[in-house]
Amino acid sequence: MTSAGLFQSCSSLRTPLLQSTAQKSLSTGPTLVPWESVTNRLERELISDGAARAINNPPSKLSLQSRSSVRCAAGEGGEKPSSFAKQWSRAGGSSSTESTTGAVRRIAEKGGRRESAGKGDSRPFGGKDRRGNGKPARGGASGEAQRAENVDGAGADGEAREGGGSGRRERQKRSHVVQEPAEFPEPMSRDPHVAILGGGMAGLMCALGLAERGIRSTVFDTGKHGLGGRMATREVEVAGKQHLFDHAAQFFTATDARFQSHVDRWLKEGALRVWDEGHLGTLRAGGEFSELPGSEGGVRRFVSPNGMRGLCEHIMADKVRQGVVAVERPVWIGKMRARGGKWVLEETGKKAGEFDFVVIAHNGKCANRLLSPAGIPKIARQMKRLELSSIWASIIAFETPLLANGSLPRLQFDAAFVEGVPAVAWMSNNTAKLEGREQARGDAVECWTVFSSAAYGRRNKVPQENIPLARAARVKQEMLEGIAAALGRPEESLPAVLFHKIQLWGAALPVNAPRTAAGGEVECIMDAVTRVGLCGDWLIAPSVQAAAVSGLSLADKIAAFHEDAAASDPSVFSAGLDASFAAVDDAHDIGVFPDALRAAAPDSKTPGVTADKHMVA
């Protein structure tokens, strides 16, 4: 074949990686095309024949008989060789660079990878994941070419990123190359600058704690509309009027003295109020409601008058004005690398700054993708041990009050833990909570936030960035049916729906957490040698208070490390790197509660649980 003919064959390849690699073999000669250029992204780029394939070893160890080298459609350790292994063998691929290039050249001549017949599958792993478990492929293995907008993972406020946010994350994921272990031989700067990735409660309280010690920080957050993370608030126009929804954390309590001092100040400043008038209880399927104790029972529930996001922005306002804290959003940090005694952060190839210390105040797959190649193995290992639940959230605006129906017994409540309905674990009247009961009565439109159970979220989990429209429609319908079942009413008796949006919190709440050898809580994780720390509610328990305490604790440790910058052994300041993980067995599907609420909340488990937790969805 002539060079021109081979170039044309290269152009027919479906991935830029193989096009560029094969074309490079023409122009530069085989000895200049290393094996890594082919394998670095091979398992995501090359194989798409409707089954899971994973190439684990270089060609010197690759054989059609090796179960450790090729994982096939039969599942983990299957013996059927992958289509690429067959192509590789037929093309003469081996461990040598020259043979590798020749194999790429010959595969290029045959048109590269194959499309799954009749499935329209353009995703690298067809219809299954690497363990052989069924997964709908992006492109249509499930027959659903169109996708619904999803708001999880694209921004801390839950807003979807237009124009290919998931594609950007995929490019970042494919570009990761593991670095050498990060080293910082010189003491930390006398005027350090800390990067905080994540603008939820944990990240903000860490920034606040650092600022109170005179340490500068920059908070990077992905939210398009504001800060907050899982304290996000949505503002929606319905029937010509703006309405607010807290579509994650609904309220919180405070029992930890460190957190309580900040809560008291926010109350005085008007950023919080006590939610006394709200009737909170347990709602069992069929309409049986039992109210739970409020302030009179020793449990003060706090909400922010303008939604939870308003509190987050209030926390930072003074420090931003003073110049000790900067906030950058929407920014998605996709790469961090140690260079010249600093951490260099990048967003899609664009430098975002150099910092003396990095705080990771978010979790899930995005955090793993950032940490894994950064040369911080101890931190990355602990993050990967985290397991998270998935929960569906609905924000719904009804044309008339939900609980007002003259032909049926009227229930009186503002929020409820729901029992016996898989699609609904929590429902809350945000109009009454955020606008006040009297004002809400004068407005026909009523806004509710509804959460599914974790079991329902697990059964209906789909790719977060691309929810199939059919699945979105089904979840919406089943959650409306769940509301009716909880109220003990036929679905047709529900008021007309004026607005309905769903979100999959794919990384909702932790189901395990690090614990000390004695079983105690690990408030934060810090590697002083590599100058990276982790904070978040997932380290303690799923709650607003736990997030705040974790952020404050990490700020204390960073400040102590900075004050003793000349320490000969920085590892003495490290924390949580060897902690083992244990199940969080004291939590309801949507959070952990104080004793008074937990004793009555459905599905709660009380033995051996401390009394300093509270609810966050």
Image (cartoon, rainbow, N blue to C red):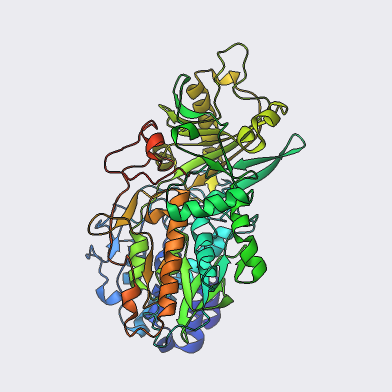
Q: Which of the pair 317/247 is nearer the observer?
A: 317
**x 36%, y 68%: residue:** 379
How many numbered discs, if any? 0
Q: Which of the pair 427/393 is nearer the observer?
A: 427
Q: Which of the pair 611/241 is nearer the observer?
A: 611
**x 50%, y 72%: residue:** 335
Place of residue 358 in the rendered image (x, y in percent of width and height, measured from the top left): 47, 72
Place of residue 22 in the rendered image (x, y in percent of width and height, measured from the top left): 48, 78
Residue 15 appears in the figure? no
Residue 126: name its quadrant. bottom left
Residue 316 appears in the figure? yes
Q: Which of the pair 445/80 is nearer the observer?
A: 445
**x 38%, y 47%: residue:** 134
208 in relation to 443, above or below: below
Is residue 381 found left or right of 77 in the rendered image? Answer: right
Residue 588: name its quadrant. top left
Is residue 523 found left or right of 263 in the rendered image? Answer: left
The residue positioned farthest toward the right in the image shown: 240
221 in relation to 336, above or below: above
Place of residue 556 in the rendered image (x, y in percent of width and height, measured from the top left): 43, 67
The residue positioned farthest toward the top in the image shown: 407
Place of residue 386 in the rendered image (x, y in percent of width and height, measured from the top left): 36, 56
